[in-house]
Image: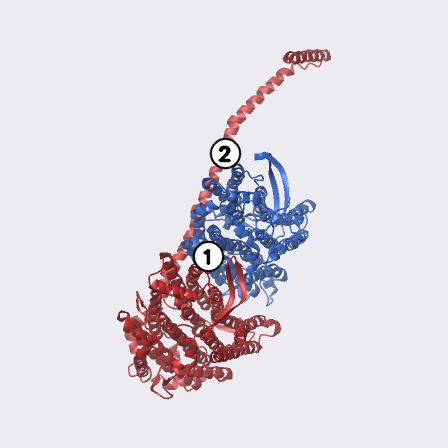
Amino acid sequence: MSLVTIIIVLLSLAWLAPLASAIVLAYAMLWTHRLSLAPGRLAVATLGLATCCSGLAALLWDWSREVGASERAIHGSYYRLLTFGQIQVDVNYLIDGLTIVLFLIVCLISTCVAAFARAYLADELTEEYIDHDVHTAAGGVVARPGRQHQFFALLMLFCFAMLGIVLAGNLLQVFLFWELVGLASYLLIGFYRERPVANAAAMKAFLMNRVGDVGFLIGLFCIWQLCGTWQFDGPAEGQPPGVLEAGDRLVRQHIADGLTGDQRWLLLVAGLGIVAGCLGKSAQLPLQTWLPDAMAGPTPVSALVHSATMVAAGVYLAARCAPLFVPEVLILIAYIGAATMLLGAVQALFSQDLKRILAFSTMSQLGYMLLAIGLGSPVAGCFHLVTHACFKSLLFVAAGSVLLATHHTLALSKLGGLHRVLPLTSVVTMVAIVSMTGLSIPFALFGEVPFALAGHYSKEQILSTALAFVSVNPRHFILFFVPLITSGLTALYLMRLWCRVFGTKPGQSPSMKGRASAGLHHRDHSWWLKGSLVVLAILSAFVAIGGDESWVAKTLAQSQQVVLLAGAATPVGRFPSLNDIHRVHNLAGTLGLLASSLGLVLGWLVYRAAWFPARELRQGMSAVGHFIEAGFYFDELYRVTIIGPVRQLAQRLSQVDQGILDPCLHAISAGTTRLAMLERRFDEGVVDGLVNGLASRAWRLGLMFHKLQTGQLRQYLLFLVIGIVVVFTAVFVGSP
Amino acid sequence: MSTLLFVLVLMPLVSALLMVLLDAQGSYRNSRVWALLSTLGTLALALGTAGRLVLEPIGAAVNRGPIHPWISVKQTWFQLGVGTGGKPVELELVLGMDGIAAWMVLVVSLLSTCAVLVSWESIKERSTEFYAGLLALETGLIGVACSFDLLLFYTFFEFTLIPLFLMIGVFSKGSLRDTFKVFLLPLAGSLLTLVGIVALATTAHSMTGVSKPFSMAELGVALAKQPLPIEYQTTIFLLLAAGMIVKLPLVPFHTWLPVAHFRAPITGSVLLIKLGLLGLLRLCVPMLPLACQETGLAVLAVLAAVGVVYGSLGALAQDDFNRVLAYGSVAHVGVAMLGLMAMNTIGLNGAVMQLINLGLSTGGLFLLAGMLQDRFGTRDLRQLGGLSAKLPMFATCVVFLSFASIGLPGLNGFVGEVLSLMGMFEVRPWLAAAGALGMALGAWYLLSVIQTLLFGGLYMPVSRTASNDVSDGGAGGGPKDLVARELFAIVPVMAACLVLGLCPQLILGTIEPDVKALLRRDLPVEEVVTATEPGANWPVDREGQVLITRESK
C-alpha cells in the first residue's frame, strides 16, 4: 500500500466514523437506556479515533513531502453520484495541505468539545428534565425526558458533514455537505425545541443560510457554464482542467481584458454567488444577524459549530475558490470583511450577554479572515481560521464552565468575581484572550521570531497583507485602518469580558464572591471539563508556534498560491506580492501590537481599576448603546423591508386566488349556467312548442282516422284489398 | 412480460368492479382488506415488470425513435382509411413501458398501497365506494404512464378525473360548487387537448403520411424525420398544452388544486400525480420541439417561474396543512416545468426526476397530513402545536419528508431541482434564478409549518381520541404516536426518498435513454426501431449496451 493510499484510507475513516457513530447514537434507546453514559463515551471515542487518524495522516503527509512527493494534492473518486451523457458528478476527495490541517483541527476541537459536552449536558441524563426557560400556558414548568444521546447523534452528524466539506473534491459535493451542515446546525440550535426562542433562532439561521445558498447554487450553475465541471482539480493530464485552474486562467484573461461579454458576466456572477454562500455561512454583512441568535443552542454547540467550525466553512470555501474570484469580487469580500469586523467588535463591546459577546467576536474575527482572502492572501485567512478555532472554542468552553457554575447566568451584570471560584477557567480564558489579542514579546526569545501565542502570528499575517495592499493602493487606506482599530477594540472588549466575569468588580467584591461560591455547582471539577479546557488552552497557545515557519502555516502554504494575483495590476488596484508583504511585516506587527496593548490597557483601566467609571460611560451614551445593542437594528430592518412585505405579499396572493381568480371561474360557470337556462327556455318555448304542435296535430289526425275503425270485418277486408291494389299499381307504374 | 402489462393496468380496476358488484353493501373490514390485497398485488406486479426494467434498462437501443416502449402490447383497433401507396391507415392501441413509465408505475403502486394503509381506520362509511374509487384511480394513473398511443393516453388521462370527482363528491362536506370546480376546470382544458390530439394525428398524417398516426412511437419517428411547420406546431402545442397547464397546474389555473387537496380524502391527495408533466413530455417535447422552444419558453416557462414564487408565497399564507402542501406543489411543479421547457438533456432529466420526487415527498407529506387528520380531526395549523412532545415518531417523519421536499442534498428532491434549474439556466438564467429563489421560500413555508406544528409549546384540540384517553386518566393519554400500520405506510416512502437521494443514478440510468431520445433530431432515414421485445439473443456492443438494429417483421 502506498503512502498516498494510507493517507486516503485514514482520512476516509476519520470522515466516516462520525457518521457510523451518529447512526448508532440515533438508535441509542434500542441498545441502552436514557441514563446511560455510553452515548457520550461513544461520541468522544469516535472523535478521538478520528483525531488519531487525521493526526497520523498529517504525519504521513509531512513524511511524503520529505521523501519527495511532488504533487500538490491527492485527488480521486469514491463513488459516481450521477452520470448522464458526458456529465459526471462524483463523490470524490481532494487532499492537500489545507485539507490536512483543517481535518486535524476540526477533529481535535470536536473531541475537546464533545468531552466538554459530556460534562455540560450531564443534566440531560434524567427521565425528567425540567426546562426552566419554558412555561406552560398555566404557568408551570415543562418537564421532558432527557435526550443527551440525541445531542451526541446530531453532533456526530455535524462532524461528518463538516469533514465532508473539507474533504470534498468538487463544488457540488461541497454544496451537499454545506446543506447538511446547515441541517445539523438547524437541529442543534433548536435542540431545546420546547423553547420558542430556540426555534425561532434555528429557523432564522437556516433561512438566512438558505438565502446565501441560493446565491451559491446560481454560482454553481455559472461555473458549470464556464468550466463544464465542478471538480476542483482536473482528473488527469490531458483532460479538461478543474475549476480552480480554469478559474485562475479566466481571471487572468479577465484582467487582461480578453473575455467575451458573456464569460465576463458568468465569471462575475459565479464569484458573487459563491461569496453569497460564504457570507451566509460565515455570518458576514448583510447576512450576519442569525449568529448571535444561534447562541440559543447549548453551549457546546456554540463552541464547536458557531465559532470554530461551521462558520469557518464559509471562509474555507472562499479560500478554496479564491482563484475563481475576479478582482472586483475580491475587493468586495475585503470590504465586507472589514465592515463586519468593525460592526462585530462594536457590538461585542456593548453587549450585556456573555455568549453573545463571544458570538459577535466570532463575526468580527471571521471578518479578518475574509479580509485576508479579499486582499489576495487566502493562506493568511486560513491560518487565522485555525488559530481562531482554537482560542474561540476555548473561550466558549470556558463560558460553558461559567454557566455551569452559575445556574446558566448569562447577563454580565449578574456575574463577577469568579476568578477565585473558577481559577482554572479564569486562567485559560486569559490565555485565550492573550492569544486572540495577539500580544507578543517584541524581541526574539527562541530563534528569529518573537515569542507569542497563536493568535499573534495569524493576525500579524493579515495585518501585514492589509498594510502591503494599502501601501500600494493608498485609496483603499480604510482596509488597513479598520483592522487596526478593530484589533484595539478586540483587546478592549475581551478585557471587559474578563474583568466583568472573573475580575472583582469595584465596590462589589465581597458580596459577589460570596454569592458566586454559594451558587456554585462543582461540575467545574469534572475531569472531562478540565481536560478539554487544558487541551484547548495548550492548542490556543502553541498551535502556531514559530509563526510563518510553523507546521500549520507551512502546510497551509503548500495548498495553493500563497498570494493571489501577486503584483498584478487590476482595475481595483495592484495586489501586493509576497515581497511587498515581507517588507511591511515588522511595521504591521508593531502597529498591531500597539493597538492591542492600548486596548488592553484601556480595558484594564476602565473595567478593572475603575479609572473611568464604565457605568457613567454607558449612561452617557445610552442612545448609541441601545442602537448598537439592538444589532444596529438589522433585524428590524429585515423585518420591515423583507419579512413583513413578503408575508403581506403572501396574504395578498392568497387573496388574489380567492378574490380574483376564483370569482372569474365562478363567473364563467355562472355564465354557463345562465346560458343553459336560456337554452332551456328556448327549448321549452320554441323547440317544445314546435314538437308539441306537431304532436297535437298528429293526435288530431289520429282521432280523425279513429272514425274509420268501425269493427266491421267486411269493411276492413275492403280497405285491405283497396290498399293492396293501390300499392301494386304504384310499384308497377313506378318501375320501368 | 408484455401480457403482464394488461394485468398490471387493469387489475386495480377489475378488483374495484368486483368489489362493487359482489359486496357493495359489505362492511369496511372486507373492503379494506380487499383493497389492500389488490394494491399489494399491483405493487408486486409493478415491482416485477417495472422493477426489472429499472434494474436492467433494455431500452438503450441505438436507433430508436423519440418515444419507444421497451416492452409493449399492440392491437389494431380499426382501419381509418387508405393512405398513400395503398397502405392502410390504422388506429393502433399500444400499451407499453419505458424507463419513465417504469418509475411512474412504481411510485403510483407504492403510494396506492400506502394510501390504503393510512385510510384503514378512518374510512368506515361508504368504504366500498371509497376503495373502489381509489383502485380505479390507480388504474387511471398506471394507464396514463403505460399508454403509448394518443387515444389510450387521452382516455386514461380523463379517466383519472372520474374517481377523484366521486371521492371528493362523496366524502367531502364541501359544496357541490367546489367539486365542480375541481372537475370542470381540468375537463375544460382537457377538451382542448382532445382537439389538439386529433389535430396532431391528422396533420401528421397528411403531412408525413405516417401509417399509424395515433401510435406515439410511429408519430415520433415521422415527426423527427419531417417536422411540422412552425405555425402548425404552435397551434397544436397551444391546444395540447391547454389541458396540461390546468392539470399541472400552472398559475393562474391553480385554484382548483388547493380545493381538491382540502376536500379530498387522503387518497385523492396522495395520488394527485402531476400527469400534465408526463403529457407535455410525451406529446409536446418530441413531436412539437420548435413550438416548445419558442412558445413554451416564452409562455409556459415564464408562467412556471411565476408559479414557483407564487406557490411558495401562497403556501406561506395558508392555515391548513393540506392547503400548504397544495400551494407547495404548485411551486414544485413550476420547477419541473422550468426543466422541461429548457428542452435540453439536463433540464428534461431534472423534470422527470422532479415528477417522481414530487410523488414521493409530497405524497408522503399528504400521508402524514392524513394521519394528523385521523388523530385530531383537523389539519388546521392554528389549532395544533408542539406535537413533537407527544408524537416523536410522527414529528421525525414530518421533518424528514419536509427536508426532502425543501431539497436538502442527500434526499431525493435536491437532484431533481438542481438539474431542472441548471437546464433552464443554460437557456434563460433569469428564470432559473427565480426558481432558485423559490427554493429559499420553499424552506420558509415548510420550516414555518414544522415550527408551529411540531416544536414549541404543546397545543392540540380536544379530539375524539384525546378525550377518550383523557377520561381514562392514564399518563399516556392523548393521541398515540404512529402505529405499526402507519409506519408500514410511511417508512417505505421515506426509504425511497433516501435511496434516490443518495443514488439518483437509479432513476437517471433508467430514464436516460428515453430522455436523450426525446431530443434526438438526427434520426437516420432507415432503420428506426419502434418496438423491441426482450430476447435472449441480442447483439451486445463493446460497452455492454444492447444493439438493436432493426425490428424483425
Which chain has been coloured red in this picture? A
From this viewpoint, is residue B322 visible?
A: no
Residue B221 appears at what percent x and percent y? Answer: 55, 44
For the residue marked with disc 1, what is the amino acid? Met
Q: Check disc 1 and report the residue beneath it.
A: B422
From this viewpoint, is residue B89 visible?
A: yes
Position of the N terminus of chain A by quadrant? bottom right
**In which chain is the residue bearing label 1?**
B
**In which chain is the residue bearing label 2?**
A
Which chain has been coloured blue in this picture? B
Q: In the image shown, does A588 or A498 lie closer to the viewer?
A: A588
B182 up-or-down from B444: above or below: above
Residue furthest to the left: A474
Q: In the image shown, does A584 or B131 lie closer to the viewer?
A: A584
B211 up-or-down from B366: above or below: above
Q: In the image shown, does A652 or A268 lie closer to the viewer?
A: A268
For the residue marked with disc 2, what is the amino acid? Met
